[in-house]
Image (spheres, rainbow, N blue to C red):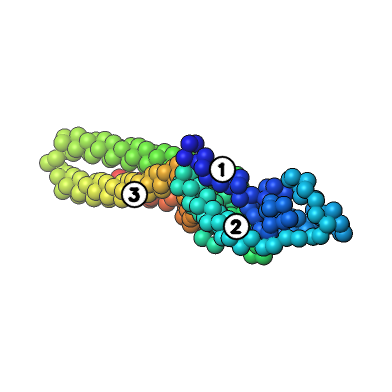
Amino acid sequence: MAADSPVLSLQDELSCSICLEYFKEPVSIHCGHNYCRACISQCWGDTDTNFSCPQCRETAQQKLFRPNRELGKVVEIARQLSFQVTVTAGGEQGCETHREALKLFCDTDHQLICVICRESQVHRAHTVFPVEEAAQQYKKQIQTRLQTLKEEREKLLRLKVSAEGRSREYLEKTDAQRQKVVSEFERLRQFLEEQERLLLARLAELEKGMTKMRDENVTKLCEEISRLSELIREMEEKCCQPASEFLQDVRSTLSRYPALRTGERMGECDSGSRHGSSRTRPV
């Protein structure tokens, strides 16, 4: 705060006592006080005599004021200095056109703007919010999509567990069937040795196909889960960024939300399971 005091004092000295803003086209009147040309002209209005100073009340019979160009130059320097101090102290970005802090967000153009930009022809008809309010709105949208992604990940995790469980079940059934065949043909080996080898070969082929199917399904699910986890991490990091940085590419972040089709994947897994199940019937 101590570092800002000289700047604030300078702002007070270079501000019009009528509009309380930096002088615009400053002029000096008969008593030596300075005002914006528009402010003092409006203050005196249609008065023909006794032009009174708004500060010291000294009057003059004629409307006398002269442009104070030196003061105008000092005001411009002070304006730039104040802008630099504000940006440096607050870590905010600044408007390159008007040298003002970017405290507004144009929702129409998805762009950070200053208060002067807001009144310009470009943004006057646009929907504009304060930066923090806009950031909160977009954070809610991000959080909604983030929650959806987490739910999709949970579905995929459940699918993975279910697929692994079905695979174990089928493998256990296959192993039990093999044991049964071995036990029966042990007693009848002399008569059915050739049949035993044939059936065991078929069971081995079925087991190999089912193992391959399981590995492929698990690999696909793991890749999808990994991708979703990375996207979730990026979005969570995005939400922790400062508002101005967060809003710079918010549309790009939202567009990266994937259109997941978990129902289709469930159908594929179920189809593969039914296919594997149908191959066990001949045994």
Q: Callout 2: 10 Å neighbours few (<14), some, many (20+)? A: some
Cα separation between marks 3 and 1: 62 Å
**Residue 187: which quarter of the image?**
top left
The reply to whether residue 84 is in sight is yes
- Image quarter in which the C terminus is found: top left
Q: Which residue is mark 1?
A: 9
Check residue 173 in the rendering and tell me which mark sits there, or answer none. Answer: none
Q: Amino acid at mark 3?
A: Glu
Is 279 situated above or below 64?
Answer: above
Q: Earlier in the sequence, mark 3 or mark 1?
A: 1
Q: Position of residue 140 (x, y in %)?
A: 56, 43
In the foreground, 275 or 237: 237
Indicate the secondary structure of the residue bearing disc 2.
helix
Check residue 71 in the rendering and tell me which mark sits there, or answer none. Answer: 2
Q: Callout 3: 10 Å neighbours few (<14), some, many (20+)? A: few
Q: Amino acid at mark 2?
A: Leu
Q: Residue at x 60, y 57 (%)?
A: 71
Q: Which residue is mark 3?
A: 223
Residue 207 in the figure: left or right of residue 266: left
Q: Residue at x 44, y 39 (%)?
A: 154
In the foreground, 71 or 275: 71
